[in-house]
Image: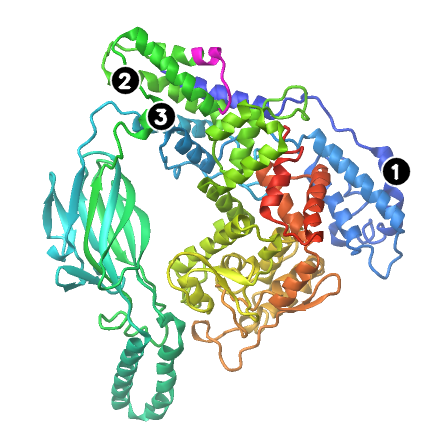
Amino acid sequence: MIHHATTIAVILIVCSVARDNRAADAVFANDSSGFAANAKSLLETHCLKCHGPELAEGEFRVDTSLGLEFNKAAVASKWGEVVNVLHSHEMPPADEQQPDSESVATLVDWIRKEQIRAEQFDRKSEVILRRLNRNEDRNTIRDLIGIDYDIGHFPQDPPAAGFDNNGRALSSSPLQVELYLAAARTILDEALVSDAQPESIVWRFEPETGDSDSNRVRYGKHNAIVNGGQNRLDGNTRVMHHNSWDRVINARDFAVPTKGTYTIRIRANSHIPTRDEVFAYAERTIRAIREKEILENPKSRNWIEAHIEEEIDHFRKSPIYDYGPGRLKVTVHLGGQPQIIGVLEIDSTQDDMKVFELPVKMTEEKAGISLEYAYHVPREMENFRFQSNDDFPRPEVIVDWFEIEGPVYDNWPPPSHQRLINSPVPADEQNRRRLARSVLANFMPRAYRRPVTDGEIDEKLKLFDAAATDGESESAFLEQLKVPLTAVLVSPNFLYLAEPYRNGTQDPLSPFELASRLSYFLWSSMPDDALFLAASTGEFSDPVKIIAQVDRMLADEKSDAFCKNFSEQWLGLRDVGANPPVEELYSHYDDHVESSLVRQSIAMFDDVLKNDRDLTEFIDSDHEILNEVLARYYGLPQVKGDQMRRVQLASDSHRGGVLTHGSVLTITSNGTRTSPVKRGTWVLKNILGTDPGLPVANAGDIAPKVPGIDKATVRQRLEIHRELAQCARCHRKIDPLGFALDNFDAAGRYRTQEGFGYQGRVQKDDPLVDASGELPDGTKINGIADLKRSLLKNDTMFVRCITEKMYSYALGREMMIADSAIIDATVAKLDESKANNQPRTLRALIGEIVLSPSFARR
């Protein structure tokens, strides 16, 4: 068997050697003469007065804070700030003597040269050998073996430069390699089978049979609990009206006889009340409640009667009663651990029962299935007393039955087995060894994503020989074969995108290395047969054929991984829900809204990509990508169904573009109120490609005991904060961008007033939202429309921003100063399309990246 400690040591040594083979005694040479010739005079003449020993404004001194060790991050950062303030004319101050433009250009050019030299010294602008991240590993196993392996127990991959495929952050540890070893064995145990096809079971659970845990029904060897909950019986069905601990339909205390993939089916439909039904019930109920209150307290008659119509009017106007279909949350409990396997929209009508299906992996552990009502009706002041009454009209889910069937196989042996072994296992040892070599010769090139040598195959075959036992069964052969296959799956050649150095960093990638770089860029997975064929036949030497492969790959459904992974990380969608809007203030926000917000932003990226729309549609568009719940949430014209689709916006709409997406607006808020600082910073980083940097060490917070602070608007709070001199310079750049988005609340809904009333409601005298501001260049803006116009006026900044981020994602490393030339060239190429009245598309950007020298070399 494989010695685990040896394997771990080999992997970690290979990785450390591959990451840095520079001589250990190499030292970065400071350019003292260059500093004296290009920088010293300007700094002394124009900067030393404020940033010298006498004042040291901002705790920054040009005589002591600026070192020449540009390979040190702190030093490079300070010089970078010097470039930023000179370029933006923030320094020297307007009332001080200004340096001539030639001196500034000389200084900036020297700083850039030193930054590039330091990057090259530290190889920061090189693509380094990197480990597959969790998603790539899962997708590769799926495409290599045909097993969808759950990587949930693997450590999260740390992001760097905004993405989790950055090679400098994807380190390995002994624990992680142990996880890879265990995973490889689990995957192969599932993939290779020697027994006859397991007998399939179909167990149907009828929830009308009982409504308590005392109701037991025999399934196989188990007396399972089947509990319909305290849900209303209607013939042979259970009617689910609202969520409550005692309204959960479930079957539990059973175990399936064989582990594998099963199908859970639910036969159900939905009843959706009309608004007229809701209004009639509410009016009748509210009047009855209030009449009783008047009888009990006659002195309150005038006050109560004055508010009755207002209370009833809520049910006439509020969009929350434009109900959609009922929803069910389906949870499987396995070995005591719950797993939500899906939330179903029950879009069948009351007269048309429909069967809904969900796949789930099961083991022989004790199991259970539960169905919970999942349609959210916000608890408002007007409805909280009675909305959980069984007679209150709200979407109902009618469940006839649910069942579990499996294990499910389209054929036997399963496809995973046939991918690895496509011939019978011989009886004699010699032919078994020959078959093992054949399996390895077929498997290893695909696993390593390159041709392998006979010597590499022979090395793995030795592991097969060493694992031999006296057993002659097919099962014994498979156990023996799993040893070298496991070794392949924990090899650095599989776990890492290996691009070994040869003569230097300018060496071009081999065709197979280029195929892998392309597939992990656009699919987050291994190359397919067409890419392997293209690599072996020399097609990657022809740019036309490379672009043809790109078009083919983008048309494949596997490109959904690219749309999801890139958009999630560029826009910050993985943070949605980390600090959600609090229910007390934003009762309309729920799990369905939250998941739809993420889907909306991913779907927009997919739409811009697949339909060749201009990149600036991310800033502003005349349409939105919506489903029914988001149309209702945003207050836009109704659409039906949970699928995302393009919806045309009115000319005066406040929506359009990612800046107005609830996903972005919620992650740039703090759960209770908006945060112009977070929103402005997000725009700088993700739209303009400018990093405002971290707050200075003594920035401080808004004093909590400032009089009236609890009733202060967000703008008033920040004005207090900006009085601190150390905060003012950064906030001048950040705050106007964030204020322009302040008409959108912390939950992403549009508003014109801030609400300080009960549950965040707007009261008569609450202040209007002030979304005005002045950009650093003097441009005055007021609200989202002005912000969009300002961003579109200089849209090349956005094109450069997304270009840089796309390069970083494609290459698996942060883009550095040394990469500026290739980024500028790509942006210029895209701008040619604009000059010719053609859209600047994501497809064109991807094409420029894959044909660039950076993509084709180490």
The front one of 382 and 407 is 407
The residue sitting at 32% across, 21% down in the picture is 422
Q: Are marks 2 and 3 in contact (CB under 8 Å)?
A: no
**Residue in view at x 47 percent, y 56 percent:** 600
Q: Residue at x 72, y 37 (%)?
A: 818
Q: Residues within 10 Å of mark 3 (few under 14, many from 20)?
A: some
The amino acid type, in three-letter code, at marker 2 is Pro
Pointer 2 or 3: first along the chain = 3
Camera-near label (1 vs 3) is 3
Image position of 84 with respect to 111: above or below: below
Q: Quadrant of residue 288?
A: bottom left
- Give coordinates of residue 761: x percent, y percent: 46, 75
Q: Which residue lies at the image location 71% right of the left edge and 48% below the top edge?
A: 832
Label for residue 419?
Answer: 3
Magenta span includes 452: yes
Q: In the rendered image, which residue does mark 1 sit on?
A: 36
The residue pinned by badge 2 equals 424
Report the span colored magenta.
449-458
Residue 348 forms part of the magenta stretch: no
> Can residue 485 be seen from the camera position used here?
yes
Element marked by disc 1: helix
